[in-house]
Image (cartoon, helix red, strand yellow):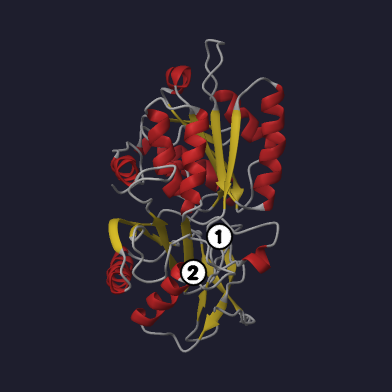
Amino acid sequence: MATETQTKQQPAKETFHFVNDPRESINDALTGLTYLKPSLSYNKEYKTVYRNDLSAFAEDHVTTIGFAGGGHEPMFGGFVGDNYLTAYVSGNVFASPTAAQIFEAIKMCQPRSGKPGKGTMVVCGNYTGDILNAGLAITRAQAAGFKVHFCPIGDDVAVGRKKGGKVGRRGLSGHLIGLKNACALAQKGESLERVAEVMEYVAANVGTIGVAFDRVALPNATLTDLQTLPPATIELGMGAHGEPGLQQISPIPTPENLTSQMLDLLLNVEDKDRAFIPFSASKNPKEDNEVVMLLNSLGSTSDEVLARFAELAQTELEKRGFVVRRLTLGPLVTSLKMSGFGITLWRLPKETGEKLERKQALQLWDEPVDVVSWRQ
């Protein structure tokens, strides 16, 4: 069973941010997306990226909104487009968008014809500020007659049940897996009830564990302080905003040993505090041994490093009796330019008998998307 250790603080050092004006860094980044992908538009007042065909799409499709604080790019702006999100609302760096921003995005996602739409699903990571602001926005939206379903997602297995309490786990990259399926269903014209059901079902079968090689520095000036880890130390389970992790590890383990330790946290069904992914067994499960794996860079970790850890993780999973059916990697949910990575596993459903059948799950996963940042 994993145990937590006290983190050690080191003296800060300076780091450089190549930005024009820290107050405009989010606007600069999201405006740039529309140049990279002309099928997107950007509402600067409410910091909202949306697909250009939103008016037509909302007439007969469930619309989907992801929102988060800035600094985690490409989440969610890089995933707005065909077969993925309808819109993304950004807060300032590491700060939730306001309730007014979220409400305006919901309103924007309603049919212009005035007829009742199929509804809107709103998704965010499980963080207190996000949930409070979403609650205010959705209450206002429902009072206005809009049909809205809210799905906050927590997938961080570093936060156990005892520590998480009523607040629950932090959101990392698990919502991207849920959205890949749910948004594909929305594109096919499914109901809000079905889209939300699949989103929540997939999220309940996903877990993520991250490891940081250093901490994160906020771009509130060109030069800022960077809190560092002690020499020859990594931090297992550090949060996406630099929150304390599960434990600091020194000396640094071999990549093989680190990968094995991370997979232990994701697969060990005997650890009642962290057995969040409902596998039937930690090794050689009979009917639920197939997984989708995502390797995520926290900002500055290269594809080459991710690919090596992906190879090690796949080899270790095969030793334990699991089959990796799909794999993707890259900078998907970052923490500015933090050095580190995360492993996310999605336990694929059994062939039959669950809210989503395995064949359909893989079909939804394989649906092509037209977005900036997803690697098919």
Identify the mark at residue 185; answer none if there is no mark.
none
Q: Nearer the viewer, residue 195 or 114?
A: 195
Give the residue at mark 2: 269
Q: Is residue 199 left or right of residue 245?
A: left
Residue type, mark 2 in image: Val
Residue carrying label 1 = 222
In the rendered view, tell whether residue 278 sits above or below residue 47: below
> Which corner quadrant of the image does residue 309 belong to?
bottom left
Residue occupying image coordinates x 52% and y 10%: 113
Inter-mark Cα distance, 2 to 1: 46 Å
Q: In the image shown, does 210 or 149 lie closer to the viewer?
A: 149
Residue 18 in picture, x, y percent from top left: 47, 57
Helix, strand or loop at disc 1? loop
Which is closer to the viewer, label 2 or label 1? Answer: 2
In primary-sequence order, the first of circles 2 and 1 is 1
Label 2's element? loop
